[in-house]
Image: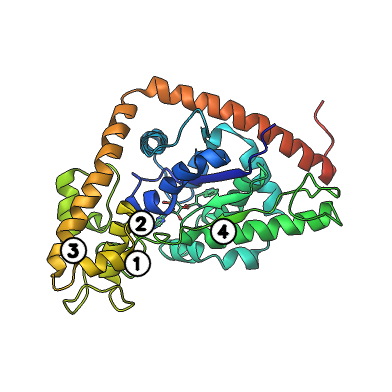
Amino acid sequence: MTTKKTMLSAVQPTSRLTIGNYIGAVKNWATMQADYDCLFFAVDLHAISDKRGAPELRDQTYRTVATYLACGLDAEKSTLFVQSHVPEHAELAWVLTCHATMGEVSRMTQYKDKSAKHGDSIPMGLFAYPVLMAADILLYDVDLVPVGADQKQHVELTRDLAIRMNNHYTPGWDGKDPTKVKPALFRIPEPWIPKLGGKIMSLQDPTKKMSKSDADLKATLFLDDTDKDIEKKVKSAVTDSGSEITDADDKPGIRNLLTLQSVLTGKPIPEIVAAYAGKMYGHLKVDTAAICVDAIRPIRDETARLMADRGYLDQVLKRGAENARKRAAMKIAHVYDKMGFIPKT
Ligand code: AMP
Ligand code: TRP
């Protein structure tokens, strides 16, 4: 039995991954994976809540896993898998759906944003999305969920659902740990958001999050962009009025470029700002472009190599799913038992 704490996170395979996914999420998973018992997966069931197309989903799911590996996730240390390979995620999601309220789920910002474009025909999956995410987490008695800032609200909902179910099915539960004297049904997870880079902004509108699904391709740096694309996009990034390079609330475009530089080089922002005294926005853009090219190039090349080796990816996913399924099956059996379902014979 491992004594390490458990960490879990995931990305939707809806498109190629972005530098926002890398900085807000996957880069941190890679750094932290040695210290935790880790599960990382591609949430293909989530991906169909807003976008559906079989060849694309299949390709993006493989690409997401290949990108995880290229970003430094280690299939020997961490459990890497695809959500749909572990049917217990969908099973637990139904159980949680029966304990969540319409009111609390309607308050989710991501739901409000994503449903707006659907008019009167909002897919139910978009609404239920955070409940499936809660199932992903609660299925594995997770301690830590490293995500970008936009997912904090979903982890908080997960905590609320876990506490509600603990109170109902294991009254008097003791603390956060299901193995305590009075065992809880679920462990209560904590979100982990990076201090810097939890929200990388769009290059075309620095008041908006950089997103995989932005229709304006110039707004987003993808982890498989060519060097030329990266240079072009960073050099045409929308910046702010004025000409001084400072880290200020009224300079969100400049702040975004400084953040990219800081996270990717490890230099603190004040040190970077000091080095630009008397220089122009153009200098900052040229340097930021070069730093992004250097960060993305090895990820792009390794992802391409892995995409050409589907046999290896399938092998990684098979092993990951076997491991995840064992844990998930035990947990769901325990939950069903506490809820009064007759055990399978
Ligand atoms: P998604 O692209 O919505 O599947 O997000 C996958 C992970 O990347 C989540 O942890 C997000 O919070 C994180 N993420 C997505 N976009 C950004 C961004 N622009 N800045 C920082 N983190 C992000
Ligand atoms: N909802 C997350 C996103 O859009 C992806 C996700 C699904 C996730 N299940 C998760 C993240 C469990 C962390 C833990 O980015």
Q: What's the distance in space between the residues labelled 4 and 3, CA to CA?
A: 35 Å
Q: CA distance from mark 3 to mark 2?
A: 23 Å
Task: Say which of marks 3 and 2 sits in front.
Answer: 3
**Disc number placed over residue 154 in the picture, else none:** 4
Q: Is residue 336 visible?
A: yes
Disc nearer the start of the sequence (1/4): 4
C-alpha span from label 3 to label 1: 21 Å
Mark 1: secondary structure: loop
Residue found 52% across the figure and 24% down from its top: 318
Upstream in sequence: badge 4 or badge 3: 4
Pick the quarter of the image with the C terminus: top right
Amino acid on which the number 1 mark rests in the picture? Lys
Query: What's the residue type where badge 2 is placed?
Result: Ser
Residues under labels 1 and 4: Cα distance? 19 Å
Please report the residue visible at 54 percent of the width from the left and 38 percent of the height from the top.
Answer: 83
Distance of mark 2 from mark 4, alpha carbons? Answer: 17 Å
Report which residue position mark 2 lands on: 211
The mark that comes first in sequence, 3 or 1, is 1
The percent position of residue 327, horizontal first and vertical second, equals 67, 33
Q: Tell me the kind of residue under disc 4.
A: His
Mark 3 falls on what kind of element?
helix
Residue 209 at what x, y percent from top left? 37, 63
Q: Which mark is residue 208?
A: 1
- In the rendered image of this protein, does residue 152 appear above or below residue 8? below
Q: Are marks 3 and 2 in contact (CB under 8 Å)?
A: no
Three-letter residue code for mark 3:
Leu
List x then y, in percent, for residue 156: 61, 61
Confirm if mark 4 falls within 8 A of ligand 2: yes
Label annotation for residue 284: 3
**Ligand 1 near label 2 (Cβ, under 8 Å)?**
yes
Q: Is residue 335 left or right of residue 241?
A: right
Structural distance between the alpha carbons of marks 1 and 2: 9 Å
